[in-house]
Amino acid sequence: MDSNFITSLPAQAAARCIIDTAKALDLLTGPVTVSPQLADAEKTLFIKMLKAMDEHRKVHGDTLQPDEISSLFTFVFAKAAESVTNMFNHKTDAFELTGMFDGRIPIYADDSITDEFKNSPFPFSCAENYLQWVENDAPHLVGCDMTLLLFEALKWCFRLSCHYAMTIVENK
């Protein structure tokens, strides 16, 4: 086994927080819809986001404000809608990072997905539940890489948002 690999129970708990949020909102009632194209999109998006996070840290420091964390969840939610739209339109994802930290996120997606997404509490609930989890488990998170935990939660928000968008398209 690679000596750089570790098992992270807190990262697993961060993921579970988002999965439980989706279940509570009835967005996840069965298996998660997956696609190799969406997996590639996730990888591309998160590499760009991690680079943007590094730049943000250089200017604003290591601590993210709750509004910035909320914006990140809304951002990946919107990018999931775009990725599913692009997949069905046979287009490549561009992943503009506009609005990533400030909540002013343009969305370029199919109208039926956009309409449903605009009314969904999912990204807000994810942010709220994640922040509450971090606050409640703070003693257990000492020494953890908080960016890793946040991005684990964001990754699951993206995946489950793609699942939700796919469900919308399939029901259309």
Image: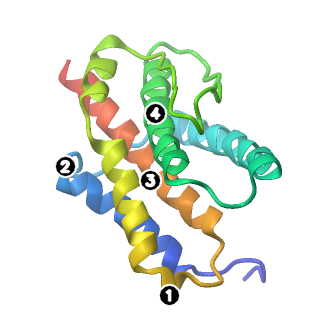
Q: Which residue is mark 3?
A: 156
Q: Nearer the viewer, mark 3 or mark 2?
A: 2
Q: Which residue is mark 2?
A: 25
Which residue type does callout 1 highlight? Pro
Left or right: where 44 falls relative to 23: right
Q: Which residue is mark 4?
A: 80
Judge the density around disc 2: few (<14), some (14-19), many (≥20) Cα neighbours within 10 Å. Answer: few
Q: Residue at x 31, y 50 (%)?
A: 125
- Mark 1 or mark 4, earlier in chain: 4
- Mark 3 or mark 2, earlier in chain: 2
Q: Which residue is mark 1?
A: 139
Instruction: Give the Cα distance between marks 1 and 4.
Output: 33 Å
> Which color scheme does this rendered protein use?
rainbow
Which residue type does callout 2 highlight? Leu
Judge the density around disc 1: few (<14), some (14-19), many (≥20) Cα neighbours within 10 Å. Answer: few
Instruction: Give the Cα distance between marks 3 and 4.
Output: 11 Å
Q: Residue at x 71, y 39 (%)?
A: 48
Instruction: Give the Cα distance between marks 2 and 4.
Output: 17 Å
- Mark 3 or mark 4, earlier in chain: 4
- Tag 3, which secondary structure? helix
